[in-house]
Amino acid sequence: MQDTVLIVGAGPAGLSAAAQVASAGYKAVLVEKEDVLGGAPIISGYARLVPSGEWAKDAIGRMVKRVEEDGNVTIHKGTKVTQLNGEAGKFTAKLSNGKSVKAGAVVLATGFTHFDSVNKPEWGFGTFPDVVTTTQVEQMVTAGKIACPSDGRTPERVAILLCVGSRDRQIGREWCSKICCTVSANLAMEIKELSPKTQVFIYYMDIRTFGLYEDRFYWKSQEEFRTKFVKARIAEVTAAPDGRLLLKGEDTLVKRPIVIPFDMVVHAVGMDPNMDNPEISKVFGVGLEQHGFIERGEHYTNTCGTTRPGIYSCGAAYGPETIDDSISQGMAAGARAIADLHGMTRKAS
């Protein structure tokens, strides 16, 4: 029986799982395909995290430091698992760096992929340089300056379009990405903090700032930062004669067409399944649900489970998820893995 847990993915969920396993006195082997740890918040350059307001580099940086300094954690960067053999309690994994790992359990913390806005061409991304994504604006906030990519000017008017790559059956994205409304409301406030004279408009089908986020982000962004929310159906983004962008669609509250000029249009991009999930499914022998995320096991007695015994998952690998909940689920998956290993050891003795 192995006392090692193999954790695949070193984003917030994977870092949390590794810390949980190590703190219980078990060995954790953390395998990350990128050359840096921290997942999307670090790789994509997130600014302040929702809901804590902490800078991503600081909050996630503490998580990275915790596992890097723990003697019970072995880290493989720039590495993938290419093969997994065995069964719960006795797995052997082959890594792309030529090494192998013997583990009693596996945690898949493999996360998600940002929706690629080129798949929504009518909204201008890839055609007009001043049509950007929330991720790009996060990077602007981190750099301390909101600017139009075309010429570097400070935008007078910014439109944020919600549900880009979410809740859209026409492009095969039937799911809500859960966090985009809140992130966009937060981003609107960050834009105003850096550029108080910039007017920010959020165009939405519905607003889903769930739970305690309603007051802290939805109402605060309107009442304190004067963000304007417009219920609308956006048809297209085109170029105006003066070089700005024209947002065309319908205001669905008053049932009339709109054609409005903006300096910058922001796509609030959704969360797609990890693009590597078909490969992950094959290597680890786990199922995928209908949209392509990792299939969740029966939740009530197989918490954090997948379709294969001894392999667990957490966070955005299962579907769109917040960072904070991903961290909690990573801890739960790590605890589940070591609890099962402890149970196997007790039965064998």
Image (spheres, grey):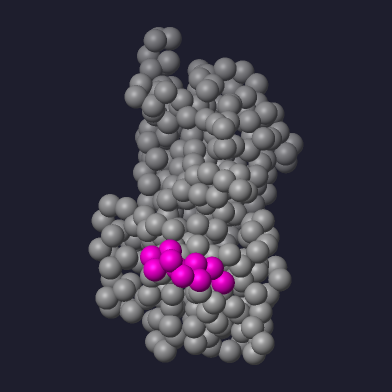
Question: Could you say where residue 268 lies in the image, as x and y percent from the top left?
Answer: 51, 62
Q: Nearer the viewer, residue 87 or 103?
A: 87
Tell me if residue 253 is in the magenta stretch.
Answer: yes
Q: Is residue 340 left or right of residue 122?
A: left
Q: Nearer the viewer, residue 103 or 237?
A: 237
In this view of the protein, can residue 9 be seen by the observer?
A: no
Q: Say which quarter of the image contains residue 339.
A: top left
Question: Could you say where residue 218 lies in the image, as x and y percent from the top left?
Answer: 32, 65
Residue under the point 61% across and 18% down: 86
Q: In the rendered structure, which segment of residues is drawn in magenta?
A: 248-257
Q: Is residue 67 left or right of residue 150?
A: left
Q: Say which quarter of the image contains residue 181.
A: bottom left
Asked if residue 71 is positioned above or below residue 179 in the image, the reply reads: above
Q: Main secondary structure of the magenta part?
A: strand
Asked if residue 237 is positioned above or below residue 75 in the image, the reply reads: below
Q: Is residue 318 left or right of residue 222?
A: right
Of all residues shown, which one is farthest toward the top?
348
Question: Could you say where residue 244 lies in the image, as x and y percent from the top left?
Answer: 61, 84
Q: Nearer the viewer, residue 244 or 213?
A: 244
Of all residues shown, which one is farthest toward the front?
255
Query: How many numbered marks have been drawn onto this rendered protein structure?
Result: 0
In this view of the protein, can residue 79 be seen by the observer?
A: yes
Tell me if residue 29 is in the magenta stretch.
Answer: no
Residue under the point 38% across and 75% down: 228
Asked if residue 301 is positioned above or below residue 30 in the image, the reply reads: above
Name the quadrant of the C terminus: top left
Residue under the point 37% across and 76% down: 227
Question: Could you say where residue 321 lies in the image, as x and y percent from the top left?
Answer: 44, 47
